Amino acid sequence: MNRRMIVGLGLLATTISSAFGADATGNYAVWGIGQASCNQYTRAYESDAVTDYKHYLSGYLTAFNTVAEGVYQGTKTNSLGDHLKSIYGYCGSHRLDSFERAIQALLAQTANQSQAQTDLSSRWGRPPKPATTP
């Protein structure tokens, strides 16, 4: 297999497990450095040791862009450096949250600032809330 195919299959595998892997209460497994706390990310950011976080963020955003309906680029035109800085700001106030949760906050913030209505209410990777009956 060539490298492109391996990378493509890897992205597809992470997309499938994230999109359909949540349990009935909306919980799902988070792999890799996405499990790190915001406190850990803040310390890494302050010591300029964010390479692993940058790679995780790149893959997460690529998967999001792949599965989010009507979205070309969920974070608009900002650079990865801008995203890492924004996540650093979020993590300063939410030190116990995971890095993955901080990325969700970044996507929600971007959607709120956007003119387009991107529906992130189901918190990507989690099943939509069941409809209530009268």
Image: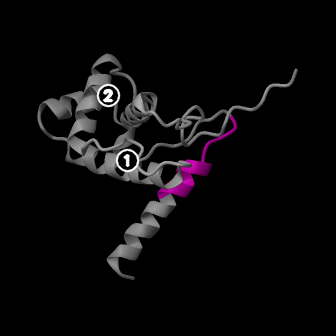
Q: Position of residue 117 (x, y in %)?
A: 53, 35
Q: Position of residue 130 (x, y in %)?
A: 75, 32
Give whichever of 41, 78 is nearer the camera. Answer: 78
The image's mark for residue 32 is 1
Residue 32 is situated, as x and y percent measured from the top left of the image, at 37, 47
Quadrant where the N terminus sits is: bottom left
Cα–Cα gap, marks 2 and 1: 14 Å
Residue lying at the far right in this picture: please name it.
134
> Vertical placement of 4 versus 50: above or below?
below
Instruction: Name the outermost residue toward the left.
Output: 47
The residue indicated by pointer 2 is: 38
Q: Is residue 19 above or below residue 27?
A: below
Q: Residue at x 50, y 61 (%)?
A: 13
The secondary structure that most of the magenta stretch takes on is helix
Three-letter amino acid code at disc 2? Cys
Would you place residue 52 above or below residue 40 in this image? Answer: below
Q: Name, please, the residue furthest toward the top.
A: 93
Q: Which residue is pictured at 38% across the width and 36% down the height?
A: 103
